[in-house]
Structures are given as C-alpha cells and as structure tokens.
Image (tube, grey):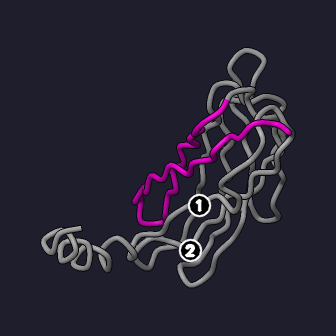
Amino acid sequence: MNITRLLLALFLLPALSARSAVTLEQTQARSGTEFKATFRVAGGCHGAPTVRLRVQLPEGVSQARPQPKPGWKMEVSRLKDRVEAVTWTGGPLAEEHFDEFQLMMVLPRRLGAVRFPVEQECAKGEVVASEPTLTLTPQQ
C-alpha cells in the first residue's frame, strides 16, 4: 500500500465509522446446508436511532424463517414461493446500543460469495446500505 492510500484510509476511517454498519456474525458456511444468519446492527446513525432494518435474500436461498423480535414488527416479502426480503420495523435501537436480527435458511448449492443487501433506516430518515457477504464452502 502506498503512502497516499494509507493517508486517505486514515483520513476516511473516522467518517466511515460514524455510520452504523450491519455485519454477519459468521462470514463462512457450507453450501446447501441449513444456516442461522445473525445480522448484527451496530446502533443508529449520527445520533438517531435505527427504526427499520430490511434484509434482502439472494437467489438460491430457500426456506427462510425470520426470528420475531419483541418491540419490532416483522414483514416478510415473497416472490412466488420464496422469501425475497424480511423487514423489521420498530425498536428503536439507540446509537449507543447494538442488536442482532436472525434468519434461518437453507443456503444455495454453489460455492463463492453470497451478498445480503441490507437497508438500515434511522429516525431522521437517513438510510444506510450495507452488503454483508457470506462465503459458501464445499460440503464435507
């Protein structure tokens, strides 16, 4: 890494960390298996609490079942016979706290990266997009 990139990364790091991010607790799983995805939300956005979280499920994911959360209303969006997205609305989740949202699912029977686009909406109307990635490995 050259010095310009290093300085740019150090300059941008505080700005990027001011925004909340959604990450996956586990970043690797075996393809074609049942998997509990835990999406960790690291608080709100610039002082405003999180009030909505929408997780989009990629093609090939099947039998998705979300976990209800007290204080949050849950909506499951379907496309034909599969769950396309799950949205939790409510909370609120303050910036100084974190929470976890979970889904059980059967993973696709392929290898490589699977992305889960996530929208996190905060009380001031700000929407932060994340794209947690799960790497699918061979079954043993």
* Quadrant in which the C terminus appears: top right
Q: Nearer the viewer, residue 35 or 111?
A: 111
Q: Position of residue 81 (x, y in %)?
A: 78, 17
Asked if 139 appears above or below 51 in the picture, the reply is: above
Q: Which mark is residue 23?
A: 1
Q: CA distance from mark 1 to mark 2?
A: 12 Å
* Mark 1, other Cα within 10 Å: few <14 / some 14–19 / many ≥20: many
Tell me what residue is drawn at x 46 percent, y 74 percent. 48
Residue at far bottom of view: 96
Graded by Cα atoms within 10 Å as few (under 14), some (14 to 19) or many (20 or more), the crowding at tag 2 reads many
**Which of 57 and 10 lies nearest the eye of the viewer?**
10
Q: Which disc is residue 43 wearing?
A: 2
- The span shown in magenta is 111-140
Mark 1 vs mark 2: in front? 1
Residue 136 magenta-highlighted? yes
The percent position of residue 91, horizontal first and vertical second, equals: 67, 67
Residue plotted at (56% across, 74% down): 43
For the residue marked with disc 2, what is the amino acid? Gly
128 in the magenta segment: yes
Q: Is residue 90 above or below residue 36?
A: below
The N terminus, quarter of image = bottom left
Amino acid under disc 1: Thr
Q: Main secondary structure of the magenta part?
A: strand
Q: Vertically, is 25 above or below 10?
A: above
- Which residue is at a point 60% across and 36% down the rendered structure image? 112
Q: Residues at badges 1 and 2 in contact (C-beta under 8 Å)?
A: no
Task: Tell whether 14 sits left or right of 67.
Answer: left
Q: Is residue 91 left or right of residue 118?
A: right
